[in-house]
Image (tube, rainbow, N blue to C red):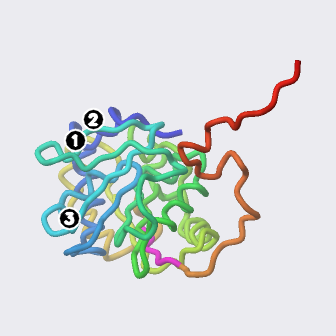
Amino acid sequence: MHLDVLDLRTFYYRTKLGRAAQKAVRDQLLRLWPDARAQTVVGFGFAAPLLRPYLADARRVVVLMPGQQGVMPWPPDLPNASVLCEERLWPLETGVADRLVLLHGLETSETPSAVLDEAWRVLGPGGRLMVIVPNRAGLWTRRDRTPFGFGRPYSLGQLEAQLRLHRFEPGRHAAALFQPPSEQRFWMRAGPYLENAGQRISGRFAGGVLFVEAGKQAAPRPTGGLRAAERPRRILDTAAQPTARTA
Protein backbone atom coordinates (compact mmCIF):
# COMPACT_ATOMS: atom_id res chain seq x y z
CA MET A 1 0.00 0.00 0.00
CA HIS A 2 1.32 3.41 -0.98
CA LEU A 3 2.07 5.94 1.72
CA ASP A 4 0.21 9.23 1.73
CA VAL A 5 1.95 12.09 -0.05
CA LEU A 6 1.50 14.36 2.99
CA ASP A 7 3.35 11.88 5.21
CA LEU A 8 6.16 11.56 2.66
CA ARG A 9 6.47 15.33 2.30
CA THR A 10 6.52 15.79 6.07
CA PHE A 11 9.24 13.18 6.51
CA TYR A 12 11.57 14.36 3.74
CA TYR A 13 11.16 18.11 4.12
CA ARG A 14 10.18 18.76 7.73
CA THR A 15 12.08 16.28 9.91
CA LYS A 16 15.78 16.16 10.66
CA LEU A 17 15.98 12.45 9.93
CA GLY A 18 14.11 12.86 6.66
CA ARG A 19 16.38 15.65 5.46
CA ALA A 20 19.41 13.54 6.33
CA ALA A 21 17.93 10.58 4.45
CA GLN A 22 17.14 12.80 1.47
CA LYS A 23 20.73 14.02 1.30
CA ALA A 24 22.25 10.54 1.66
CA VAL A 25 20.08 8.98 -1.04
CA ARG A 26 20.37 11.95 -3.39
CA ASP A 27 24.16 12.10 -3.01
CA GLN A 28 24.42 8.43 -3.94
CA LEU A 29 22.22 8.95 -6.99
CA LEU A 30 24.43 11.84 -8.08
CA ARG A 31 27.52 9.64 -7.73
CA LEU A 32 25.96 7.16 -10.12
CA TRP A 33 24.34 9.72 -12.42
CA PRO A 34 26.31 12.96 -12.08
CA ASP A 35 24.92 14.52 -15.25
CA ALA A 36 21.63 14.51 -17.16
CA ARG A 37 22.39 17.30 -19.60
CA ALA A 38 19.83 17.54 -22.43
CA GLN A 39 18.07 14.37 -21.22
CA THR A 40 14.51 13.63 -20.15
CA VAL A 41 14.47 12.55 -16.51
CA VAL A 42 11.37 10.85 -15.08
CA GLY A 43 10.66 9.84 -11.49
CA PHE A 44 7.90 7.54 -10.28
CA GLY A 45 6.60 7.16 -6.73
CA PHE A 46 8.04 9.89 -4.54
CA ALA A 47 11.25 10.68 -6.41
CA ALA A 48 10.91 14.46 -6.16
CA PRO A 49 13.47 14.88 -3.31
CA LEU A 50 16.15 13.35 -5.55
CA LEU A 51 15.58 15.14 -8.84
CA ARG A 52 16.08 18.84 -8.08
CA PRO A 53 19.80 18.78 -9.09
CA TYR A 54 18.79 17.79 -12.63
CA LEU A 55 16.37 20.68 -13.18
CA ALA A 56 19.04 23.09 -14.40
CA ASP A 57 20.49 21.05 -17.26
CA ALA A 58 18.00 18.31 -18.16
CA ARG A 59 15.80 18.73 -21.21
CA ARG A 60 12.81 17.93 -19.05
CA VAL A 61 12.10 16.58 -15.56
CA VAL A 62 8.76 14.89 -14.82
CA VAL A 63 7.66 13.40 -11.50
CA LEU A 64 4.84 10.82 -11.66
CA MET A 65 2.97 10.25 -8.41
CA PRO A 66 0.52 7.31 -8.18
CA GLY A 67 -3.11 8.00 -7.40
CA GLN A 68 -3.09 5.82 -4.28
CA GLN A 69 -0.37 8.07 -2.86
CA GLY A 70 -1.59 11.47 -4.01
CA VAL A 71 0.27 14.34 -5.62
CA MET A 72 1.85 17.58 -4.49
CA PRO A 73 3.06 20.54 -6.58
CA TRP A 74 6.77 20.26 -7.38
CA PRO A 75 9.11 22.06 -7.51
CA PRO A 76 7.59 24.72 -5.24
CA ASP A 77 9.44 27.67 -6.77
CA LEU A 78 9.23 26.73 -10.47
CA PRO A 79 6.54 25.68 -12.96
CA ASN A 80 4.89 22.47 -11.84
CA ALA A 81 6.47 19.23 -13.06
CA SER A 82 4.48 16.69 -11.02
CA VAL A 83 1.62 14.60 -12.40
CA LEU A 84 -0.95 12.32 -10.76
CA CYS A 85 -1.17 9.03 -12.62
CA GLU A 86 -2.36 5.44 -12.54
CA GLU A 87 0.22 2.79 -11.67
CA ARG A 88 -0.69 0.75 -14.71
CA LEU A 89 -0.92 3.56 -17.26
CA TRP A 90 1.59 6.41 -17.16
CA PRO A 91 0.74 9.56 -19.15
CA LEU A 92 3.98 9.45 -21.14
CA GLU A 93 4.82 8.46 -24.68
CA THR A 94 6.61 5.19 -25.28
CA GLY A 95 10.39 5.54 -25.22
CA VAL A 96 10.43 9.15 -24.00
CA ALA A 97 12.65 8.76 -20.89
CA ASP A 98 16.44 8.82 -20.91
CA ARG A 99 16.69 8.40 -17.12
CA LEU A 100 14.01 6.88 -14.91
CA VAL A 101 14.09 6.77 -11.08
CA LEU A 102 11.78 4.68 -8.91
CA LEU A 103 11.64 5.68 -5.23
CA HIS A 104 8.76 4.51 -3.00
CA GLY A 105 7.15 3.30 -6.21
CA LEU A 106 7.91 -0.41 -6.36
CA GLU A 107 7.98 -1.80 -2.82
CA THR A 108 4.65 -0.20 -1.88
CA SER A 109 2.81 -1.02 -5.09
CA GLU A 110 0.03 -3.61 -5.19
CA THR A 111 0.91 -4.25 -8.85
CA PRO A 112 4.73 -4.16 -9.03
CA SER A 113 4.75 -6.10 -12.31
CA ALA A 114 2.61 -3.42 -13.94
CA VAL A 115 4.94 -0.71 -12.61
CA LEU A 116 7.99 -2.40 -14.14
CA ASP A 117 6.14 -3.02 -17.41
CA GLU A 118 5.32 0.69 -17.64
CA ALA A 119 8.93 1.55 -16.76
CA TRP A 120 10.09 -0.66 -19.64
CA ARG A 121 7.62 1.00 -22.00
CA VAL A 122 8.54 4.62 -21.30
CA LEU A 123 12.31 4.07 -21.16
CA GLY A 124 13.93 4.90 -24.47
CA PRO A 125 16.66 3.01 -26.33
CA GLY A 126 19.90 3.37 -24.41
CA GLY A 127 18.03 4.77 -21.41
CA ARG A 128 18.80 3.78 -17.83
CA LEU A 129 16.52 2.80 -14.97
CA MET A 130 17.47 3.32 -11.30
CA VAL A 131 15.40 1.39 -8.78
CA ILE A 132 15.78 2.41 -5.13
CA VAL A 133 14.16 0.11 -2.57
CA PRO A 134 14.46 -0.69 1.16
CA ASN A 135 17.23 -3.18 1.85
CA ARG A 136 15.89 -6.35 3.47
CA ALA A 137 19.09 -6.64 5.51
CA GLY A 138 19.15 -2.99 6.60
CA LEU A 139 18.08 -1.31 9.84
CA TRP A 140 15.67 1.14 8.20
CA THR A 141 13.13 -1.56 7.27
CA ARG A 142 12.67 -2.29 10.99
CA ARG A 143 11.39 1.16 11.88
CA ASP A 144 7.97 2.08 10.56
CA ARG A 145 8.38 5.72 11.54
CA THR A 146 10.19 6.18 8.22
CA PRO A 147 8.88 5.44 4.70
CA PHE A 148 11.45 2.64 4.36
CA GLY A 149 9.65 0.58 7.01
CA PHE A 150 6.62 0.03 4.76
CA GLY A 151 6.05 -2.27 1.82
CA ARG A 152 8.21 -5.17 0.64
CA PRO A 153 11.95 -4.83 1.27
CA TYR A 154 14.27 -6.50 -1.22
CA SER A 155 17.59 -8.24 -1.20
CA LEU A 156 19.92 -7.48 -4.10
CA GLY A 157 19.29 -10.90 -5.65
CA GLN A 158 15.51 -10.53 -5.38
CA LEU A 159 15.53 -7.12 -7.02
CA GLU A 160 17.80 -8.20 -9.86
CA ALA A 161 15.65 -11.27 -10.51
CA GLN A 162 12.52 -9.10 -10.60
CA LEU A 163 14.15 -6.75 -13.11
CA ARG A 164 15.26 -9.57 -15.40
CA LEU A 165 11.75 -11.01 -15.34
CA HIS A 166 10.48 -7.69 -16.71
CA ARG A 167 12.99 -7.32 -19.56
CA PHE A 168 15.69 -5.29 -17.82
CA GLU A 169 19.37 -6.13 -17.57
CA PRO A 170 20.74 -5.17 -14.12
CA GLY A 171 24.08 -3.41 -14.03
CA ARG A 172 25.71 -1.37 -11.27
CA HIS A 173 24.41 -1.55 -7.73
CA ALA A 174 25.06 0.54 -4.62
CA ALA A 175 23.60 1.34 -1.20
CA ALA A 176 22.95 4.33 1.05
CA LEU A 177 21.58 5.15 4.51
CA PHE A 178 24.32 3.58 6.57
CA GLN A 179 23.45 5.72 9.58
CA PRO A 180 20.84 4.30 11.98
CA PRO A 181 17.26 5.62 11.62
CA SER A 182 17.54 7.68 14.78
CA GLU A 183 17.20 11.39 15.52
CA GLN A 184 19.43 11.22 18.56
CA ARG A 185 22.01 13.97 18.41
CA PHE A 186 24.99 11.60 18.39
CA TRP A 187 23.74 9.62 15.38
CA MET A 188 22.68 12.72 13.48
CA ARG A 189 26.15 14.21 13.88
CA ALA A 190 27.80 10.91 12.98
CA GLY A 191 25.59 10.42 9.92
CA PRO A 192 27.89 11.93 7.24
CA TYR A 193 30.89 9.97 8.56
CA LEU A 194 28.90 6.73 8.59
CA GLU A 195 27.73 7.33 5.03
CA ASN A 196 31.28 7.91 3.82
CA ALA A 197 32.56 4.85 5.66
CA GLY A 198 29.70 2.70 4.41
CA GLN A 199 30.40 3.59 0.80
CA ARG A 200 33.95 2.29 1.21
CA ILE A 201 33.10 -0.83 3.20
CA SER A 202 29.81 -2.22 1.88
CA GLY A 203 27.66 -1.54 -1.14
CA ARG A 204 25.24 -4.36 -0.51
CA PHE A 205 24.43 -5.48 3.02
CA ALA A 206 24.64 -2.65 5.55
CA GLY A 207 22.81 0.23 3.86
CA GLY A 208 19.17 1.02 4.47
CA VAL A 209 18.37 1.25 0.76
CA LEU A 210 19.61 -0.55 -2.34
CA PHE A 211 20.21 1.01 -5.74
CA VAL A 212 20.17 -1.09 -8.90
CA GLU A 213 20.78 0.45 -12.31
CA ALA A 214 19.36 -1.42 -15.28
CA GLY A 215 19.15 -1.16 -19.04
CA LYS A 216 16.31 -2.17 -21.29
CA GLN A 217 16.36 -5.54 -23.04
CA ALA A 218 14.99 -5.55 -26.56
CA ALA A 219 13.41 -9.00 -26.44
CA PRO A 220 9.70 -8.91 -25.54
CA ARG A 221 8.47 -10.77 -22.49
CA PRO A 222 5.64 -13.22 -23.30
CA THR A 223 2.56 -12.25 -21.35
CA GLY A 224 -0.18 -14.31 -22.97
CA GLY A 225 -1.99 -11.11 -23.92
CA LEU A 226 -3.72 -8.51 -21.79
CA ARG A 227 -7.10 -9.19 -20.34
CA ALA A 228 -9.84 -7.10 -21.86
CA ALA A 229 -10.11 -4.95 -18.73
CA GLU A 230 -6.37 -4.18 -18.88
CA ARG A 231 -6.22 -3.08 -22.51
CA PRO A 232 -5.84 0.70 -22.97
CA ARG A 233 -9.16 2.16 -24.09
CA ARG A 234 -9.81 5.03 -26.39
CA ILE A 235 -12.43 7.52 -25.36
CA LEU A 236 -14.96 6.32 -27.93
CA ASP A 237 -14.43 2.67 -27.00
CA THR A 238 -16.67 3.15 -23.98
CA ALA A 239 -19.66 4.20 -26.07
CA ALA A 240 -22.11 1.36 -26.37
CA GLN A 241 -22.96 0.19 -29.87
CA PRO A 242 -26.67 0.40 -30.80
CA THR A 243 -28.46 -2.92 -30.62
CA ALA A 244 -31.87 -4.02 -31.80
CA ARG A 245 -34.51 -4.38 -29.14
CA THR A 246 -37.41 -6.79 -29.23
CA ALA A 247 -40.79 -6.18 -27.75
| SS for dot 1 | helix
What type is the residue that disc 2 sits on? Answer: Thr
* Predominant SS of the magenta segment: strand
Mark 3 vs mark 2: in front: 3
Nearer to me, 128 or 19: 128
In the depicted structure, whether residue 80 falls above or below residue 196: above
Q: Which mark is residue 13?
A: 1
Q: Earlier in the sequence, mark 1 or mark 3?
A: 1
Residue ID for mark 3: 54
Give the left or right position of residue 224, taking residue 77 as reference: right
Confirm whether the magenta stretch covers residue 2.
no
What type is the residue that disc 3 sits on? Answer: Tyr
| SS for dot 2 | helix
Q: Quadrant of residue 201?
A: bottom left
Give the left or right position of residue 239, taking residue 192 as reference: right
State the CA–CA distance, disc 1 to disc 3.
18 Å
State the CA–CA distance, disc 1 to disc 2.
6 Å
Which segment is the magenta one?
A: 210-216
Q: Point out residue 231 in the picture as x, y percentages from the top left corner.
A: 64, 52
Q: Which mark is residue 10?
A: 2
Q: Earlier in the sequence, mark 3 or mark 2?
A: 2
Give the left or right position of residue 233, taking residue 55 as reference: right
Nearer to me, 147 or 180: 147
What residue lies at 43% left-to-right and 47% top-to-bottom? 148
In the picture, the quarter occupied by the C terminus is top right
Mark 1 vs mark 3: in front: 3
Other residues around mark 3 within 10 Å, as few (<14) / some (14–19) / many (≥20): many
Confirm whether the magenta stretch covers residue 212.
yes
